[in-house]
């Protein structure tokens, strides 16, 4: 869209375009260590690391990796929860010119084995609780060395001492943070502690070099590695700073999102360093732990998903905790309910807006403005320097009012690792990225999601968008949440199946659901079957997995 109608709805001071510096990610840490050497860079459950100390640990970590034989361009797997060690490992790999490959540390051995084999990682930095899984599959990969990372090493010394106490609480905490590993597995702490800092004149990576392979399954469930360059990731943090207007050296960002997920990685690992923010990192999301940190080191910015915001609001109201230090929050991964947004803004006196993106866009491509024009439930406006088109899914050269969203900008990825055919399907000529999302644009430039193309249901020749049915089901008395999927139905194509969870004590049946929906959706969109579940399957960050709902249904209804 050459006219960029969304620019009129931008927040004050947000530019139409951004200048992306010709530099790699390590440059931001060097600047932060020089500008704010004594500022706390990471706070992990009270254990603090300044920017000067972080830069030193990163230099030693990079040399430790070099001593293990890692060279520029090699892939290094990181299999860690959020922690100071995760920050150090991430930056150390990049400083060496190697490529980070992030993994979910709770994955099974089979899941880890697929990704490790696919990336060709030569070294794996692994949480002690995941070491056994990686060792189980190591022989089927290119991994030469598995290094154990003990999260307890990042705790303040008082907490480390408390872990040794012969009491139940200490045993539970130890079990949550660490596990025993075989004696032949080297310790990350020991390797970093023994290493000299990487020489300052060691070659830096270039902006066009590959920085990250981030696995994404999308709606297919088959993980593929999205290749993100240093320029992609630098561009997204520059765009993010332009959007938020963050003043360097002043922010305190709460790292409740997993760093191994694209959303958490960019806002907590790259954006935080770029703006000189203090990162308060949590090994997992625990509202009580977050509120305890809020008393110790009040936050200013919270990237989160809606269920996290809800749970924090509930906990704060129950305890009387003060959340007013949070000036803004960015919500992603799923629609932000208006009630959740209103509740958060009432408790914080700040703003919460939605961001939209994909792993393939580093990940943020659109956002709601941090202004009175924000709109819960909408995807938002294209970020500075980002262009979009809305096209016919079957003819992407034809622009339409409602259709598939295409994205173009400096944050768009370089393609899928060793998958040229899938890259060609996703990246069109000129660098336009197919998102697979059906959207429309309102008069003010705000983009609104209709649904995912791959999750659209075709029944009797008619198209059913699951989210439209789900929105109406969630408004039905007694229904807590819903997922709508299509299942094979012979000549009709597919039948609509609704899976719901209910409020305590509630009861609904298929007839009641169809009666509720009849005046609200098209007749062909009415569910033919209803499944009541105790809970809906979700990703680690809380997104409902329709694909799993469908697979489970087909397994139990052959």
Image (tube, rainbow, N blue to C red):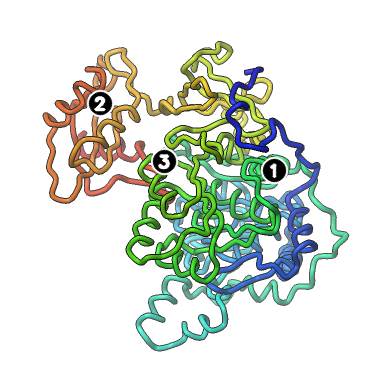
**For the residue labelled by badge 3, is the local secondary structure a helix, a strand or a loop?**
loop
As rendered, which of 232 and 277 lies closer to the eye?
277
**For the residue labelled by badge 2, is the local secondary structure a helix, a strand or a loop?**
strand
Q: How many marks?
A: 3
Query: Can residue 426 be seen?
Result: yes
Residue 105, percent across and down? 49, 58
Residue 128, percent across and down? 51, 69
Q: Which mark is residue 238?
A: 1
Marks 3 and 2, how far apart in space? Answer: 25 Å
User: Relative to 212, is 6 above or below?
Assistant: above
**In the rendered image, which residue does mark 2 sit on?**
496
Label located before the other in sequence (1 or 2): 1
Residue at figure coordinates x 53%, y 19% from the top left = 390
**In the rendered image, which residue does mark 3 sit on?**
336
As rendered, which of 1 and 146 lies closer to the eye?
1
Marks 3 and 1, how far apart in space? Answer: 24 Å
């Amino acid at each position: 869209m050459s006219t960029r109608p969304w620019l009129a709805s931008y927040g004050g001071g947000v530019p139409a375009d951004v200048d992306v510096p010709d530099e790699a990610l390590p440059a931001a840490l060097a600047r932060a260590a020089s500008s704010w050497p004594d500022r706390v860079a990471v706070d992990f459950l009270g254990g603090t690391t300044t920017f000067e100390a972080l830069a030193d640990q990163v230099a030693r970590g990079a040399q430790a990796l070099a001593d293990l034989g890692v060279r520029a361009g090699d892939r290094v797997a990181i299999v860690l929860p959020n922690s100071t060690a995760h920050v150090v490992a991430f930056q150390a790999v990049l400083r060496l010119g190697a490529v980070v490959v992030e993994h979910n540390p709770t994955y099974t051995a089979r899941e880890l084995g697929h990704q490790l084999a696919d990336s060709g990682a030569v070294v794996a930095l692994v949480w002690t609780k995941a070491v056994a899984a990686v060792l189980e599959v190591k022989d089927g990969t290119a991994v030469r060395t598995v290094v154990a990372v003990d999260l307890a090493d990042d705790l303040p010394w008082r907490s480390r001492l408390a872990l040794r106490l012969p009491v139940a609480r200490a045993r539970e905490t130890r079990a949550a943070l660490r596990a025993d590993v075989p004696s032949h597995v080297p310790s990350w702490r020991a390797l970093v502690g023994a290493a000299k800092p990487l020489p300052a004149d060691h070659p830096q990576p270039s902006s066009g070099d590959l920085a990250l392979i981030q696995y994404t399954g999308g709606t297919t469930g088959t993980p593929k590695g999205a290749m993100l360059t240093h320029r992609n990731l630098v561009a997204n943090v520059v765009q993010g700073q332009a959007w938020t207007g963050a003043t360097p050296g002043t922010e305190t960002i709460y790292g409740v999102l997993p760093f191994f997920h694209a959303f958490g990685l960019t806002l907590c690992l790259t954006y935080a360093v770029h703006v000189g923010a203090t990162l308060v990192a949590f090994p997992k999301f625990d509202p009580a732990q977050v509120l305890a940190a809020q008393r110790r080191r009040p936050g200013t910015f919270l990237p989160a998903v809606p269920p996290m915001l809800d749970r924090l609001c509930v906990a704060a109201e129950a305890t009387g905790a003060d959340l007013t230090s949070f000036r803004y929050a960015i919500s992603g991964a799923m629609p932000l309910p208006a009630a959740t947004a209103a509740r958060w803004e009432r408790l914080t006196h700040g703003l919460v807006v939605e961001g939209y993106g994909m792993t393939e866009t580093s990940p943020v491509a659109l956002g709601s403005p941090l202004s009175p024009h924000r709109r819960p439930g909408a995807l938002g406006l294209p970020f500075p320097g980002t262009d979009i088109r809305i096209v016919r899914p079957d003819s992407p050269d034809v622009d339409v009012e409602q259709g598939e969203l295409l994205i173009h900008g400096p944050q768009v990825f370089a393609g899928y690792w060793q998958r040229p055919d899938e890259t060609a399907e996703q990246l069109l000529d000129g660098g336009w990225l197919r998102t697979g999302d059906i959207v429309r644009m309102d008069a003010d430039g705000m983009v609104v999601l209709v649904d995912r193309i791959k999750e659209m249901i075709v029944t009797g020749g008619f198209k059913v968008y699951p989210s439209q049915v789900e929105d109406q089901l969630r408004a039905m008395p007694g229904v807590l949440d819903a997922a709508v999927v299509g299942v094979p139905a012979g000549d009709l194509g597919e039948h609509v199946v609704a899976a719901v969870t209910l409020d305590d004590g509630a009861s609904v049946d298929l007839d009641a659901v169809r009666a509720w929906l009849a005046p609200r959706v098209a007749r062909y969109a009415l569910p033919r079957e209803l499944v009541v579940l105790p809970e809906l399957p979700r990703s680690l960050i809380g997104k409902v997995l329709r694909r799993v709902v469908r697979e489970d249904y087909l397994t139990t209804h052959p």
